[in-house]
Image: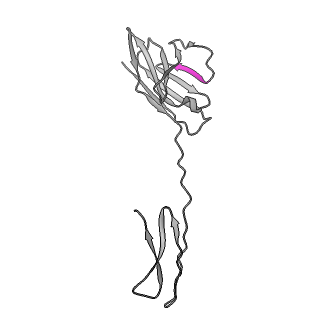
């Protein structure tokens, strides 16, 4: 006796998402709920053992039943559909909840473009000129080398 869930994960907004619920209590229907990030919980629909859907005027979702398998389909996944989904059955005055299933579009990570710096090459005995620069919070200042005739850049700043 139990209830469990699985889903296809949304790859992007506007994609179709299917949530599947296995209800081993064959004499009961299934309620579908969505819990948002702020913990508000919203009733989506109920599908009976005879596949009658309540309420009937659902536009974002579609539901079906095949044996012990109940399916909730999000036709075109949008931000408002993101959250934790539950299927719930009711038997002998007891509510049986599935474990929550998180359904989110993965966040894309954007990285800054790589910084390319050019390192000057010196011939033996040639002087290198450094200017004051600040790169990513590091101050680059010229310093005199005590061991050769070239001037090198010294990095100063917190690491």
At horizontal 61% and vertical 14% (from top left) the residue drawn is 56
Is residue 131 left or right of 93 when viewed as pictured? right
Q: Toward the viewer: 78 or 127?
A: 127
At which x and y percent is residue 142?
A: 48, 76
Q: Toward the viewer: 31 or 65?
A: 31
At which x and y percent is residue 92?
A: 37, 8
- Which stretch appears magenta? 60-65
At which x and y percent is residue 123?
A: 52, 88
Colour scheme used in the picture? one colour
Using the image, determine if residue 95 lies above or below residue 20. above
Residue 10 included in the magenta stretch of the image? no
Q: Toward the viewer: 56 or 154?
A: 154
At horizontal 46% and vertical 79% (from top left) the residue drawn is 152
At which x and y percent is residue 87?
A: 46, 21
Q: Toward the viewer: 34 or 3?
A: 34
Q: Is the magenta stretch mostly helix, strand or loop?
A: strand
**Residue 22 lies in what quarter of the image?**
top left
- Please state, as top left, top right, bottom left or bottom right, where the N terminus lies in the image: top left
Is residue 36 left or right of 99 when viewed as pictured? right
At horizontal 52% and vertical 15% (from top left) the residue drawn is 46
Is residue 3 left or right of 133 when viewed as pictured? left
The residue sitting at the bottom extreme is 125
């Amino acid at each position: 006796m139990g209830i469990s869930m699985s889903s296809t994960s949304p790859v992007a907004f506007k994609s179709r998402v299917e949530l599947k619920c296995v209800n081993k209590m064959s004499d009961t229907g299934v309620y579908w709920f969505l819990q948002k990030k702020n913990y508000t919980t919203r009733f989506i629909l109920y599908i009976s053992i005879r596949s009658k859907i309540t309420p009937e005027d659902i536009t974002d979702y579609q539901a079906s039943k095949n044996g012990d398998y109940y399916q909730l389909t999000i036709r075109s996944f949008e931000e408002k559909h993101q959250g934790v989904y539950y299927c719930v059955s009711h038997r002998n005055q007891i509510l049986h909840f599935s474990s929550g299933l998180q359904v989110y579009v993965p966040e894309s990570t954007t990285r800054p473009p790589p910084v390319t710096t050019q390192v000057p090459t010196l011939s033996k005995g040639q002087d290198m000129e450094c200017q004051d620069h600040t790169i990513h919070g590091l101050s680059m200042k010229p310093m005199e080398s005590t061991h050769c005739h070239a001037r090198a850049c010294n990095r100063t700043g917190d690491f």
